Image: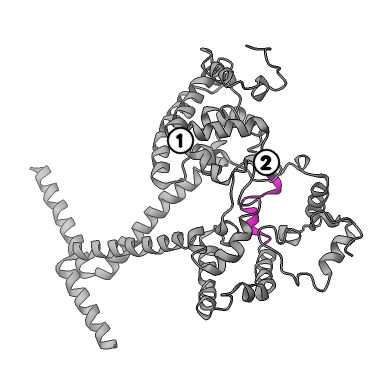
Amino acid sequence: MFKKFKNYLQSYCSLSARCPIGVFFSVFTLGILFWGAFNTSMEVTNTETFCISCHEMEHNVYKEYKKTVHYENRTGVRATCPDCHVPKEWWHKVVRKVSATNELFHKIMGSVDTPEKFEAKRLELAEHVWDTMKETDSRECRNCHAFNSMSLAAQQKTSQTAHKRALEEKRTCIDCHMGIAHKIAKNFDSNGEMHKMFKKEKRNCGDCHKGMQLGEGW
Amino acid sequence: MEYDGGERRGRKQWGRLFRYCVMHPALTVSIFLLTGLIFWGGVNWGMDMTNSEDFCISCHEMEQNVYQEYKQTIHYSNRTGVRATCPDCHVPKEWGYMVKRKIEASNELFHKIMGSVDTPEKFEAKRLVLANYVWQTMKENDSHECRNCHSFNSMELNMQKKTSQKAHERAVVEKRTCIDCHMGIAHKLAKNYDSNGDIHKMFKKEKRNCGDCHKGMQQGDGW
């Protein structure tokens, strides 16, 4: 092995002595090809088409997302899968891509390859995403949404109060905005902490549960 | 004679450098790669730097006129807090088109140096001409920069006002482009805008309400 490498190095040196320009150009071209291929594969795996090429995504979370405001809305500004789930900054993106190998592993293992298996794992998977978002101060949300650009006066009264409180208490988006693009797991908040928090804030049940009146569910 | 000598000496030096490179291939290749990297990084860094709002409003021509107007609009501040900054609307996202736009911007640098619009009065006098350039470009590229964010595929017409629904349905059928109607949404319209009345004629034919463009104006007020 080592000898082979030494041979290779020697032939490289003698080649660059005989034809230096050729070697420069081949190194340059190789560099461009390598860099280009790396970036291209980053871009290709950063499209919605790639995400939903797995039926685990296409049949579960994608279908749910298609009913939400992030897919279709008044102004026609859409957020696609990678907008929320892959960082925009180069370095953070590479880190996310590397950790995605775990997802490939579970794809091969078929860990969530039926709707039932997916449902059973939903809370755990969602909590992974929520934990990451709490750690990064909901960085991917804030790539599009910023308090600086937000006109509270254009919002509903409840949202205004909640956002003012969020600013004062330095809360992050995902602290409240869970399950906005995908269904929330049935066993979500089984220890009741979220409900306690919202109760303390005197939030209306209807804020999260459509049509539910205060007092119905506590 | 002296000149020839100089040339010969020059050639000799190039030859020496060439031989040095041949003797140290690894070093040479690394220098090549490093130079390439720095050059490439420099170009991209320069593109990024000049693609920020801070750079745009570092010229008082932008900061005191169009930027102040834009700050009052929905693209600056809105319900959801999703903002479009200067380059989002005025610089293409695709690399090739972006480079082309950056090169064209040298004309803007020239006029900055000439002081063509360096007072509010001069700016006002030029406003329609400048706006027309932007509209023309947007018509030619089918409002490409608008569509980087807004697309009909993601648009729920039911959530819009009746007038907007109708106008957008018509736009899809007649293959209109965004800027055909949405002029002056982020900056003030020039006073001498539509002086030949073409736009007014078009909207009159479509039975649009005056209030769609002129806040609070009733039908028949202005025709």
Report x, y in % for residue B99.
40, 42
Q: Would residue B53 be visible to someone looking at this image?
A: yes
Viewer-side residue, B89 vs B44: B89
Label 2: few (<14), some (14–19) or many (≥20) C-alpha neighbours in 10 Å: few
Report x, y in % for residue B1.
7, 42
The correct choice, above or below, for A62 with respect to B176 in the image is below
Q: Chain of mark 2?
A: B
| Mark 1 element type | loop
Q: Quadrant of residue B3?
A: top left
Is B142 magenta? The answer is no
The correct choice, above or below, for B132 with respect to A39 in the image is above
Q: Amino acid type of disc 2?
A: Met
Is A146 magenta? The answer is yes
Q: In screen coordinates, is A133 left or right of A208?
A: left
Residue tagged 1: B142
Report x, y in % for residue B10.
16, 51
